[in-house]
Amino acid sequence: MIPVILSGGSGTRLWPLSRGQYPKQFLPLVSNHTMVQETLLRLAGLEGIKAPIAVCNENHRFMMAEQLLEIGARPAAIILEPMGKNTAPAVTMAALSAVSEDDILLILPADHVIGDLVAFHKAIEQAKIQAQQGYLVTFGIVPEQPETGYGYIKRDMVQHGSAFGVAAFVEKPDAETAKQYVNSGDYYWNSGMFAFKAGVFLSELDKFNPEMLSICRQALAAAKVDLDFVRLDKNLFATCPADSIDYAVMEKTDKVVVIPLDAGWNDVGSWSALWDVTNKDANGNAICGDVLTVDSHNSFIHAQNKLVAVIGVHDLVVVETADAVMISPKDRVQEVKQIVDQLKQRGRSEVDLHRKASRPWGNYDLVDSGERHQTKRIVVKPGAKLSLQRHHHRAEHWVVVKGTALVTKGEETLLITENESTYIPLGVIHCLENPGVIPLEIVEVQSGSYLGEDDIIRFDDQYGRV
């Protein structure tokens, strides 16, 4: 089986921790590993698991590559989507990338929590048997209670080994309908996880949406391969219909079966859902970071940078990051999407970026900013190098506080060590590199009429960002 990691979500319901450029699947929310890493690590022990295929947004490519590398996973490919087109095109690209049409794809969204790995592995082995027989397998979560936030799968009474036929896929219901679904015992939550042969899926897609298949083939054929990255042709992919795998294939095919899965599944779609799967103290509080509580119960409190103290609060969510604080009753956390919408309308950077931003060469932390200046703390990994670039609107002062910097400044090449500095005038081509074996840390003071991150003209970049 080839695991296919779908990582296209933006995770806006977990703002301010999850941002557009750093969504929830790349965060360590329930363990020391990120959710992307957990998605692969929970497959350990299964036989016949091949190198994974990951499908992600182009802007997240370096985070995906680095996080897979951290757990020793070498992907068969990391397919980069120039824009989101929902799950059907993403799965199609993975199926077209499989070595053989008989390869079984195990489709796994990158942001799920699975509590019972024994039950999960058993369901996967059962799905493999069904997939080998030519079925398109979906995993239906045995519902714990009525839930209006999920789509449902209704099974029929025809059994295929450990699987059932599918009578219908149904949309998210109202509360009363959800209660009827759960009481009947015939309905499962739609998990968004699947297993099938690549060739069977492509054949069914050709029946029901040949236009999507044709455009995906063209975009993949015109793709550029850069190390593990497969860069789809942007202009071609932009013409691809946007659709979910359910709408495009699963609701139309007669080859679909559902395998019930009762394994402590959670898609961590909200702060209250994260509270559900997080360890709690004696008062029912899920606490992360430097937190003090007095007479507080059943709350989720996350402190990223500062001491957070709460007194007499109940059923509350408190999330503190370097540049934002969000406070909400647990039963209203879905409304955080309204805050995200306001941020978008006002053009606020907090919707997409953290104060501390990751880059393929390291990271930077925006320490201070004003009308014509801003200060960053920059960390460059050993052997890493920023792009050769220049700016039209700002000059930069660099002070090395740790390590050694190799600086290109116009025609000059400088080696700068701790407590030394240099000045990059406006318009001068420059580059920063860490030639050492320890992280390089510098303080950068920018000054000028415009300080946006888009004031960068790149002439050369080892990460393909020219």
Image (cartoon, rainbow, N blue to C red):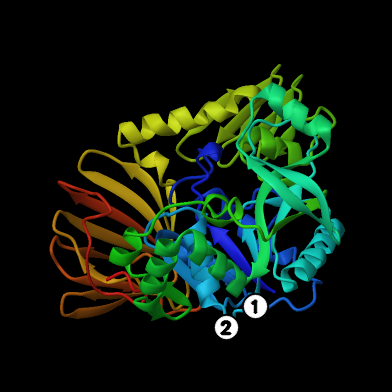
Percent across and percent down for residue 196 are 66, 67
Give the Cα separation between the discs numbered 1 and 2: 7 Å
Q: Nearer the viewer, residue 225 or 127?
A: 127
User: Which quarter of the figure is the N terminus placed in?
Assistant: bottom right
Name the residue tied to disc 1. Answer: 103
Percent across and percent down for residue 395 are 18, 57
Q: Nearer the viewer, residue 445 or 139?
A: 139
Q: Nearer the viewer, residue 40 or 199?
A: 199
* In the depicted structure, whether residue 317 falls above or below residue 404: above
Circles 1 and 2, Cβ within 8 Å, touching? The answer is yes
* In the depicted structure, whether residue 297 falls above or below residue 133: above
Decide if residue 366 is on the left or right side of residue 262: left
Please give the name of the residue rendered at 57% of the width and 83% of the height, measured from the top-left corner: 99
Name the residue tied to disc 2. Answer: 99
Q: Secondary structure at mark 1?
A: loop
* Amino acid under disc 2: Val
* Amino acid under disc 1: Asp
* In the depicted structure, whether residue 31 falls above or below residue 318: below
Q: Nearer the viewer, residue 112 or 205?
A: 205
Percent across and percent down for residue 444 are 32, 57
Q: Secondary structure at mark 2?
A: loop
Please give the name of the residue rendered at 63% of the width and 37% of the height, measured from the top-left corner: 302
User: Which quarter of the figure is the C terminus placed in?
Assistant: bottom left
